[in-house]
């Protein structure tokens, strides 16, 4: 299965930026502030940070290592390191990629629509209520949001067709640094607003009374979603990695970059929400309703608004290509499809699966699944169940089937010693499977 002519990253920095590009996306800019807002601020932030270090980074190392060893898609890689039957874990990942991209593209599509609304002046100087109307009108319509969903999928498919170094790597190298600069500018603007400090302190000062098992599960799901873990995106990017690459070092860079952007996004959104007397727990539409209202009341707000949604789209595209790549790599490696055919057909299927998510904002809004609209259900189920389970199985496979000593020797083919090999192996083998299972079961069923 592993093939000598397999594509590889053109450079180390290209790989790190592409993997960071996968990690950094709607998860950081849209989902993170939303979850912080709903989970009571500073305490959630603390739980989240602990989870990213104890679970996120070790699992990212594990996924990169399986990928590089396997030199193939997620299903093939699990079969290669753990034996044929474990291919099923990989299949779970392909399914998760399919599902996540289907609703991800719907939300990203709203962002693309907002770019055009800023250009045409439709969002200029509006108050929260008026922006809310614009948002509801956009998202509850049957056809228009599907058009933007289609545009976003077409961009994603186009880049994935171009392949690893020409498409994904080039795009990431150019786009990620621009994103960083724009976010820093917006954060400075936001924390210097009148009254922003109350938000800053709500965001940073933990109130431990709010922590409960649901918050811990949602911090875990958020960490998996944001780090692109548990479904093979990072694994697949690892499979294009050369043997000389230092995996733990790269994982730390990617993770720190990802955490930094999420925390920064919090600094853009939460202080602004407080400065304008809005509600931090108002959920997924937060950035689509409260933020434009904030921009509307700011000098040069139109330009900041336009910049923000351009940047959101950029970040979403570099994540979406990694989601699609998991599915496409599977079709290319296992079914021997051409990259073009795999990208086009998988992309079409994902577009179609996104339709009910889009409609759940309007005509299907009364049809609830487990008490949630279809889109929220897809998000909850894929992040908190599929990804966390994928992480659990990754730890089991590396810890118990492939064995951590084989993983460590794969990591050390780079020529440098993995200094934290012993604590890493202990975490993966003993702590992770137990802790993940407890959080998942307890968070879901009790
Ligand atoms: N990490 C991406 C984001 O934060 C989303 C993603 C999830 C990408 C899972 C790949 C795999 O937007």
Image: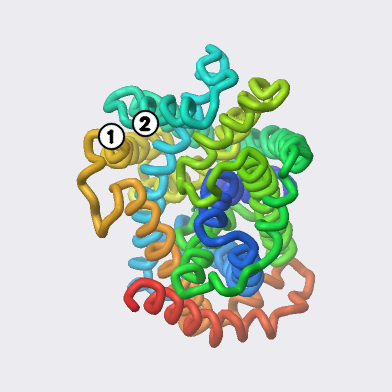
Q: Pick whichever, 75 or 382, lies toward us.
A: 382
Q: Earlier in the sequence, mark 1 or mark 2?
A: 2
Q: Quadrant of the N terminus?
A: bottom left
Q: Which mark is residue 362?
A: 1
445, above or below 154, in the image: below
Outermost residue, top side? 120
State yes or no: discs 1 and 2 in contact (Cβ < 8 Å): yes
* Mark 1 neighbour density, 10 Å: few (under 14) some (14–19) many (20 or more): some
Placement of 261 over or under 416, stated as above or below: above
In this rendered view, identify the residue nearer to me: 379 or 399. Answer: 379
Provide the residue designation for mark 2: 139
Numbered circle sitting on residue 38 = none
Q: Is residue 359 visible?
A: yes
Looking at the image, is 95 positioned above or below residue 426?
above
Residue occupying the point 73% across, 79% down: 420
- Whole-number angstrom distance, CA of label 1 to CA of label 2: 7 Å
The spot of residue 143 in percent (x, y) is: 29, 24
Residue 24 location, x and y as percent?
61, 47
Secondary structure of the residue carrying numbered label 1: loop
Q: What's the residue at 59%, 44% (across, down)?
A: 29
Dot 2: few (<14), some (14–19), or many (≥20) neighbours within 10 Å?
many
Query: Depth check: 350 or 354 in front?
Result: 354
Ligand 1 is within 8 Å of the C-beta of the residue at disc 2 = no
Instruction: Give the image location of residue 6, x and y in percent.
Output: 54, 48
Residue 418, how many percent across, how many down? 74, 75
């Amino acid at each position: 299965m592993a093939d000598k002519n397999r594509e590889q990253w053109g450079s180390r920095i290209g790989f790190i930026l592409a993997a960071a590009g996968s990690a950094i996306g709607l998860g950081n800019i849209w989902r993170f502030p939303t979850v912080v807002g709903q989970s009571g601020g500073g305490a959630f932030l603390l739980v989240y940070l602990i989870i990213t270090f104890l679970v996120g980074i070790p699992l990212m190392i594990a996924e990169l290592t399986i990928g590089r060893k396997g030199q193939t898609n997620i299903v093939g890689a699990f079969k290669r390191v753990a034996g044929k039957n474990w291919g099923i874990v990989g299949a779970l990942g392909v399914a998760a990629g399919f599902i996540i991209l289907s609703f991800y593209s719907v939300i990203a599509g709203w962002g693309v629509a907002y770019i055009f609304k800023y250009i045409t002046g439709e969002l200029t100087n509006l108050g929260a209520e008026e922006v809310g109307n614009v948002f509801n009108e956009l998202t509850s319509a049957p056809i228009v949001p599907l058009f933007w969903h289609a545009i976003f999928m077409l961009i994603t498919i186009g880049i994935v067709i171009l392949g690893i170094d020409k498409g994904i790597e080039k795009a990431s190298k150019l786009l990620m640094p621009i994103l960083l600069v724009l976010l820093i500018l917006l954060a400075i603007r936001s924390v210097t607003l009148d009254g922003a400090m109350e938000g800053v302190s709500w965001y940073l000062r933990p109130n431990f009374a709010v922590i409960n098992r649901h918050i811990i599960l949602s911090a875990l799901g958020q960490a998996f979603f944001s780090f692109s873990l548990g479904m093979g995106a990072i694994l697949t990017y690892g499979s294009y990695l050369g043997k000389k690459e230092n995996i733990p070092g790269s994982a730390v860079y990617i993770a720190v970059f990802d955490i930094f952007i999420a925390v920064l996004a919090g600094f853009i959104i939460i202080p602004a929400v407080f400065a304008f007397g809005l509600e931090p727990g108002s959920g997924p539409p937060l950035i689509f309703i409260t933020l434009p209202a904030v921009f509307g009341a700011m000098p040069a707000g139109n330009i900041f608004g336009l910049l923000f949604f351009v940047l959101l789209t950029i970040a979403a595209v570099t994540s979406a290509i990694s989601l699609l790549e998991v599915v496409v790599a599977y079709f290319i490696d296992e079914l021997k499809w051409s990259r073009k055919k795999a990208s086009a057909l998988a992309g079409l299927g994902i577009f179609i699966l996104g339709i009910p998510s889009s409609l759940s904002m309007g005509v299907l809004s009364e049809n609830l699944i487990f008490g949630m609209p279809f889109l929220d259900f897809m998000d909850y189920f894929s992040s908190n169940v599929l990804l966390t389970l994928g992480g659990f199985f990754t730890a089991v496979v590396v810890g118990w089937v492939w064995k951590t000593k084989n993983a460590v020797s794969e990591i050390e083919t780079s020529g440098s010693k993995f200094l934290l090999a012993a604590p890493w192996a202990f975490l993966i083998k003993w702590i992770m499977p137990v802790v993940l299972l407890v959080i998942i079961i307890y968070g879901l069923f009790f």
